[in-house]
Image (tube, rainbow, N blue to C red):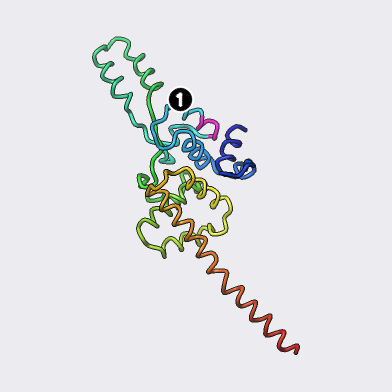
């Protein structure tokens, strides 16, 4: 319930009302990503808190590292613990526990996720998370191939996908001002809006012509 509330508020943005209903429809990896990004940004975060967040989203920290490629272990504290363990071989198990408790993790940036199947397939045949789709689109957009971007949007029905748009807007608000990520997200969002309007225009125009023709026939 807490996760749904917090993620719902992230999706709502500046609106007063939380979008708990939208949060209920959100896939687990994307829900975790928004929760983590909201609280820790893309800085190092304590693994203990991230484990709790992952569990609340129905995931584990190992899944987020190994399967979903969303987290990376920074190992800052691990290195220090290993050095201490080498100096004192007795009680080696205790430093290992301290290392686990004090280690850090961080979210992978959109341009650090290099899996070829990201955005196309998901582990175990599960539905592709929205965060994977958005990160794939950012990589395609960065590559400058607008045709591939449009092809991906149409193939996966994202132009009129309400939750996709909300997550995209949430990421814009969570990203740093004047950063490359924010610039790409905003330009991608504008592109989707513009292309959507262009694609609807011919249909409306055609209906208008048919209506005008029918009126002339009546006269």
Query: Which quarter shows the N terminus?
Result: top right
Position of residue 68 relative to residue 80, above or below, is below
Q: Position of residue 86 (x, y in %)?
A: 25, 16
Q: Position of residue 53 (x, y in %)?
A: 51, 31
Q: Residues within 10 Å of mark 1 (few under 14, many from 20)?
A: some
Q: Secondary structure at mark 1?
A: helix
Q: Position of residue 165 (x, y in %)?
A: 54, 52
Q: Position of residue 147 (x, y in %)?
A: 41, 65
Residue at 54% x, 69% y is 199
Query: Which quarter shows the C terminus?
Result: bottom right
Residue furthest right as drawn: 218
Q: Which residues are magenta?
A: 53-58
**In front of the other: 52 or 190:** 190
- Residue 32, magenta (yes or no): no
State the image quarter where residue 146 is shown. bottom left
Examine the residues drawn in magenta and state their main secondary structure: helix
Residue at 47% x, 61% y is 191
Q: Which residue is mark 1?
A: 48
**In front of the other: 48 or 123:** 48
Residue furthest top as drawn: 90
**In front of the other: 79 or 125:** 79
Position of residue 40 relative to residue 113, above or below, is above
> Is residue 20 left or right of 130 when viewed as pictured?
right
- Residue 55, magenta (yes or no): yes
> Is residue 127 left or right of 43 when viewed as pictured?
right
């Amino acid at each position: 319930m807490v996760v749904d509330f917090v993620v719902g508020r992230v999706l709502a943005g500046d609106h007063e009302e939380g979008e708990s209903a939208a949060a209920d429809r959100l896939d687990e990896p994307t829900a975790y990503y928004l929760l983590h990004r909201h609280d820790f940004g893309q800085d190092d975060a304590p693994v203990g808190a991230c484990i709790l967040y992952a569990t609340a989203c129905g995931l584990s920290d190992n899944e987020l590292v190994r399967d979903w490629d969303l987290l990376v272990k920074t190992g800052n504290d691990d290195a220090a613990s290993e050095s201490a363990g080498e100096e004192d071989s007795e009680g080696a198990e205790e430093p290992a526990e301290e290392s686990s408790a004090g280690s850090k993790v961080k979210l992978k940036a959109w341009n650090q996720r290099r899996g070829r199947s990201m955005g196309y397939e998901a582990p175990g045949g599960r539905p592709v998370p929205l965060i994977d789709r958005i990160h794939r689109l950012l990589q395609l957009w960065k590559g400058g191939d607008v045709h591939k971007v449009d092809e991906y949007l149409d193939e996966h029905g994202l132009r009129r996908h309400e939750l996709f748009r909300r997550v995209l807007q949430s990421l814009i608000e969570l990203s740093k001002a004047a950063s490359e990520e924010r610039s790409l997200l905003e330009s991608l969002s504008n592109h989707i809006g513009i292309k959507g309007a262009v694609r609807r225009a011919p249909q409306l125009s055609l209906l208008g012509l048919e209506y005008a023709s029918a009126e002339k026939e009546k006269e």
